[in-house]
């Protein structure tokens, strides 16, 4: 079940719902997801490195609430150190019971920054007690970053811009599929709009140059 809303600066926001019953890796109930795509005037490498950097997270992640996020551990996946899984913690007191799992990957065709909040008890159960990680309920959100194709055009600057898709998922408790409240829709819509506006504000000018893309 899905619908489309007019988004930030004319970018449509696609929303859909699904109900999870038997998947142990996802929380049970109705999951509400939203996604939108927009252009960023910076090369994919710069956008990817910025979004994956823990020191910059508070500037775009609404759920950080302005808190300082720290890297707890990191596991590389391949020769490129940017392809990795990272465990993060927000130092805001009321967020102490939650951590963030982030996975980043990149190649010449596309880059991804995917993350999900997870309760600290579940993480400690996997790391210390050897519990099955397949049974840790996650709702991933994140970014897909693609080149806009302008970097290789004749007369271009060699860097090009980026096509950025952002997607969020949220568990909506106590409702039936197809009976979402206006509040639930407004919450996710505001979350994705605010994130888009923050990212656009971080890249207000064309900074795609040959030197930055290297």
Image (cartoon, helix red, strand yellow):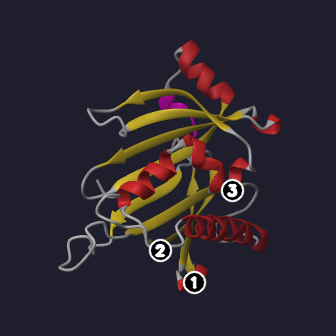
Picture coordinates of residue 162, whole percent (x, y): 38, 68
Q: Is residue 197 visible?
A: yes
Left or right, residue 15 beside residue 151: right
Q: Tell me the quarter of the picture where residue 157 sits.
A: bottom left
Q: Which residue is mark 3?
A: 62
Circle 3 SS class: helix
User: Which of the two labelled residues, at mark 3 and mark 2, occupies the earlier sequence position?
Assistant: 2
Residue under the image location 44 percent in, 58 percent down: 47
Picture coordinates of residue 137, whole percent (x, y): 58, 39
User: Which of the two labelled residues, at mark 2 and mark 1, occupies the earlier sequence position?
Assistant: 1
Q: Are marks 2 and 1 in contact (CB under 8 Å)?
A: yes
Residue under the image location 67 percent in, 28 percent down: 120
Picture coordinates of residue 166, whole percent (x, y): 51, 63
User: Which of the two labelled residues, at mark 3 and mark 1, occupies the earlier sequence position?
Assistant: 1
Q: Nearer the viewer, residue 195 or 54?
A: 54
Q: Which residues are magenta?
A: 133-137
How dense is the environment of label 2, judged by Cα within 10 Å: few (below 14), some, or many (20 and up)? some
Q: Are marks 3 and 1 in contact (CB under 8 Å)?
A: no
The disc label shown at residue 1, or none:
none
Q: Nearer the viewer, residue 25 or 199?
A: 199
Q: Which residue is mark 1?
A: 9
Left or right, residue 176 beside residue 109: right
The disc label shown at residue 38, or none:
2
Give the quarter of the figure containing the N terminus: bottom right
Residue 134 shown in magenta: yes
Residue 133 drawn above or below residue 200: above
Q: Tell me the quarter of the picture where residue 151 sits.
A: bottom left
Q: Residue furthest front?
A: 211
Circle 1 SS class: helix
Picture coordinates of residue 14, whole percent (x, y): 53, 74
């Amino acid at each position: 079940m899905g619908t489309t809303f007019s988004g930030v600066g004319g970018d449509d926001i696609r929303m859909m719902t699904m109900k999870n019953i038997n998947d142990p890796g996802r929380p049970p109930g109705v999951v509400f997801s939203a996604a939108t795509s927009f252009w960023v005037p910076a090369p994919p490498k710069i956008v990817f490195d910025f979004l994956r950097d823990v020191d910059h997270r508070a500037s775009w992640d609404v759920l950080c609430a302005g808190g300082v996020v720290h890297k707890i551990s990191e596991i590389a996946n391949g020769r490129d150190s940017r392809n990795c899984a990272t465990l993060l913690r927000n130092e805001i007191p009321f967020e102490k019971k939650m951590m963030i799992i982030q996975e980043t990957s990149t190649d010449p065709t596309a880059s991804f920054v995917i993350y999900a909040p997870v309760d600290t008890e579940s993480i400690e159960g996997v790391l210390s007690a050897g519990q099955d990680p397949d049974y840790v309920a996650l709702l991933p959100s994140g970014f897909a970053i693609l080149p806009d194709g302008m970097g290789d055009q004749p007369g271009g600057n060699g860097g090009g811009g980026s096509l950025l898709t952002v997607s969020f998922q949220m568990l909506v408790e106590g409702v039936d599929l197809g009976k979402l409240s206006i509040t639930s829709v407004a919450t996710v819509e505001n979350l994705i709009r605010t994130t888009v506006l923050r990212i656009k504000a971080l890249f207000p000018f064309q900074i795609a140059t040959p030197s930055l893309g290297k």
